[in-house]
Image (tube, rainbow, N blue to C red):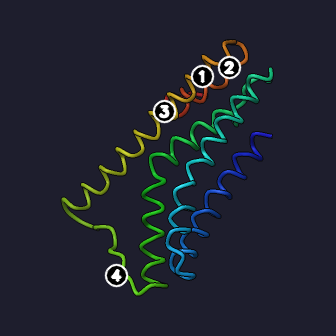
Amino acid sequence: MIATLIIGGEIAFWILVVAGLCSRYILGWRKLGASLLLITPIVDLLLIIFTIIDLRSGVRAEFIHGLAAIYIGVTVAYGHRMIKWADERFAYRFANGNKPKPSPKYGEPHAKHERQGWYRHVLAWFIGIILLGLMILIVGDPLRTQKLKDVAIWWGGYCCN
């Protein structure tokens, strides 16, 4: 069930983004477009709520439950950047906006760009680890949450198996 919700959440995220951008640039409904883009975080909130409900119902945590925390961490850290990327391209294509600038390829600007990506990854990891820890605390059963601990260790790069 949780796997379906994660996949559905990802699909819903992109449907909201595309619908928001189409409303904004193709149909000219700027307020509706902005509203659709602003509600994308609700998808993530619902996903973590359903994941916790599933765990509280007595099921043993699996990798997929941990994947929900990773998904949310990545979405929080990268979501705004992804929407901005798509918005620039939609504006250019459908509203005579400025041509999007390519990422820097060399030198200090390139290094800065790469560092910012690394900082975003650390932020995604931090958020995901906090969510994994909260799920472990909420369930309160170490035997049923071992997989969540395994996900935290795996994502931290300490996987040996």
Instruction: Give the vertical position of 96 relative to 30 (above or below).
Output: below
Q: Secondary structure at mark 3?
A: loop
> Is the C-beta separation of discs 3 and 2 under 8 Å?
no
- Mark closest to the chain's N terminus, 4 or 1: 4
Give the SS element for disc 4: loop
Q: Amino acid at mark 1?
A: Lys
Q: Which residue does the numbered mark 3 point to in the structure image?
A: 157
Q: Nearer the viewer, mark 3 or mark 2?
A: 2
Q: Residue at x 44, y 33 (%)?
A: 126
- Cα distance between the residues tagged 3 and 4: 40 Å
Above or below, 38 against 144 in this view is: below
Label 3 to label 2, Cα distance in Å?
19 Å
- Locate residue 22, reporting x and y percent: 57, 76
Give the residue at mark 4.
98
Query: Residue 78, position in %: x, y?
Result: 46, 52
| Farthest left residue in view | 108
Dot 2 amino acid type: Thr
Amino acid under disc 3 = Gly
- Horizontally, is 159 left or right of 15 in the view? left
Q: Are marks 2 and 1 in contact (CB under 8 Å)?
A: yes
Answer with left or right where residue 3 lies relative to residue 93: right
Q: Which residue does the image show at 42% across and 82% down from the upper left?
A: 92
Amino acid type at mark 4: Asn
Above or below 54: residue 109 = below
Dot 2: element: loop
Q: Are marks 4 and 1 in contact (CB under 8 Å)?
A: no
Residue closer to the observer: 72 or 105: 72
Residue 7 has which mark?
none
* Image quadrant containing the N terminus: top right
Residue at mark 1: 149
